[in-house]
Image (cartoon, rainbow, N blue to C red):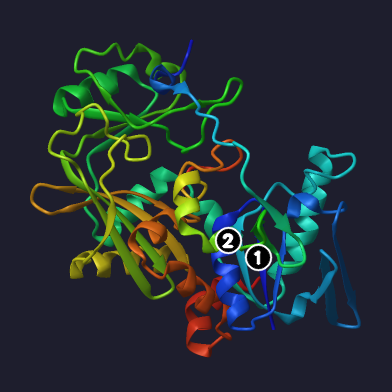
């Protein structure tokens, strides 16, 4: 039984997992859906009540029914590098590839349907609330007046993108940024705006969850940190990520979150305040983990490899299989 | 008529610098020019920043 990894060639983080799978002699096929029809091929036959499908990449041929798991790591858009790419071809290739894989019975990390839903930050915030995780007061609005009133109630605010996507043409980054109390909120009318009460944090927390395994890392905020730097991704701090203990109640709430989200993998970001409370910021369903492993030495890649290599177990299917196997 | 959040945008830092490894389709791994597996060189990964949450921001969501 083979592990299928969908990601780009340049994804050296995926390499960290492939190394462990190789060491365990677990067969791996790695491909980027972007290479469909130009290096990656597929075929599926539905005849006499049965299905036989195959994928080919890099000289390897794998049966779709012979997949034990599918890791949707960082795949490109299907057929994006075809000889004559088009939106139509991408849709065709995506339907063919993911449609066949949905019928495979393999375990998913993460299933495309769950992944798609889990990317929505407003949905994340509500699920976090329902799961018992503390969520900073948040407003998502196109009403300038609502933004003004929110700023009166919560004068210390940050703004961040709703989607997490970065604008292109020209390429720009939109870090989580502090909003001055006297800011003109008129431009809120031109796009949904996410405003959130700033958590005066003493540390950033990155909690990586692989199946039932949780690994938390903590990056302390230096006492002399620039108060304008609120986004750890863009901060200049050299403070290292270190392994951290997970509060029991937080662990319970995170399990509830991931169970409801139908995710077998998630990388959750929290801001730890002066009282030690972990405030939920977001859950990245395909969150990067290499930088955490490199700094903390936590065995995240090995844990992912073990999850992917594990044969499907009946009790696990009752958690994942109900939703991950297409009817 | 720029959306509010874009008032806080900054030019993206191009992180797609030349990496000292290349994908080996036989191994299904990136390999350094001296033949070693790139993922095994953690000091290099740290230096390059190719495993961080903003790596690949141009094509994927930050995670």
Residue annotated with mark 1: A5
Residue A234 is situated, as x and y percent measured from the top left of the image, at 37, 34
Q: Residue at x 43, y 67 (%)?
A: A300
Seen from this angle, which residue lies furthest front? B34
* Element type at mark 2: helix
Pick the front one: A186 or B38? B38
Q: Are marks 2 and 1 in contact (CB under 8 Å)?
A: yes
**Chain assignment, label 2:** A
Q: Residue at x 69, y 68 (%)?
A: A102
Q: Quadrant of the C terminus of chain A?
A: bottom right
Relative to residue B54, is residue A287 depicted above or below?
below
Q: Quadrant of the N terminus of chain A?
A: bottom right
Residue A136 is situated, as x and y percent measured from the top left of the image, at 22, 42
Residue A14, numbered label: 2
Judge if badges 2 and 1 mark residues of a common chain: yes
Q: Which quadrant of the structure image shows residue A297?
A: bottom left
Q: Residue at x 28, y 42 (%)?
A: A238
Relative to residue A123, is residue A187 depicted above or below?
above
Seen from this angle, which residue lies furthest left? A275
Q: Residues within 10 Å of mark 1 (few under 14, many from 20)?
A: many
**Chain assignment, label 1:** A
Mark in front: 2 vs 1: 2
* Residue B49 seen in render: no
Residue A79 is situated, as x and y percent measured from the top left of the image, at 80, 48
């Amino acid at each position: 039984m083979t592990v299928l990894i969908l990601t780009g060639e340049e994804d050296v983080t995926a390499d960290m997992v492939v190394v462990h799978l190789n060491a365990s002699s677990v067969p791996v096929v790695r491909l980027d859906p972007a290479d469909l029809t130009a290096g990656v091929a597929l075929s599926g036959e539905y005849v006499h009540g049965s299905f036989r499908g195959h994928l080919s990449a890099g000289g390897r041929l794998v049966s779709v029914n012979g997949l034990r798991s599918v890791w949707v790591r960082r795949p490109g858009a299907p057929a994006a590098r075809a000889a004559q790419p088009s939106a139509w071809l991408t849709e065709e290739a995506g339907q063919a590839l993911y449609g066949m894989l949905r019928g495979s019975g393999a375990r998913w990390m993460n299933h495309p349907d769950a992944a798609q839903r889990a990317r929505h930050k407003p949905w994340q915030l509500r699920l976090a609330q329902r799961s018992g995780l503390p969520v900073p007061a948040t407003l998502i609005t196109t009403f300038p007046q609502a933004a003004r009133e929110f700023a009166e109630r919560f004068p210390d605010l940050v703004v961040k993108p709703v989607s997490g996507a970065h604008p292109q043409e020209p390429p720009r980054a939109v870090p989580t940024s502090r909003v001055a109390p006297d800011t003109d909120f008129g431009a809120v009318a031109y796009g949904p705006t996410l405003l959130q009460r700033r958590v005066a944090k003493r540390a950033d927390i990155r909690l990586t969850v692989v199946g039932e395994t949780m690994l938390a890392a903590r990056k302390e905020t230096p006492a002399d940190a620039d108060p304008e730097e609120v986004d750890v991704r863009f901060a200049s701090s050299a403070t290292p990520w270190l392994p951290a203990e997970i509060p029991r109640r937080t662990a319970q709430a995170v399990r509830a979150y991931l169970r409801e989200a139908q995710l077998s993998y998630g990388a959750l970001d929290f801001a730890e305040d002066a009282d030690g409370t972990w405030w939920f910021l977001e859950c990245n369903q395909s969150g990067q983990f290499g930088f955490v492993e490199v700094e903390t030495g936590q065995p995240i890649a090995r844990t992912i490899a073990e999850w992917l290599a594990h044969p499907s177990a009946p009790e696990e299917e009752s958690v994942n299989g109900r939703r991950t196997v297409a009817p | 008529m720029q959306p509010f959040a874009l008032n806080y945008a900054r030019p993206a830092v191009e992180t797609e610098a030349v990496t000292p490894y290349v994908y080996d389709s036989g191994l299904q791994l990136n390999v350094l020019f001296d033949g070693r597996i790139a993922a095994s060189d953690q000091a290099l990964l740290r230096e390059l920043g190719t495993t961080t949450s903003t790596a690949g921001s141009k094509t994927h969501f930050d995670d």
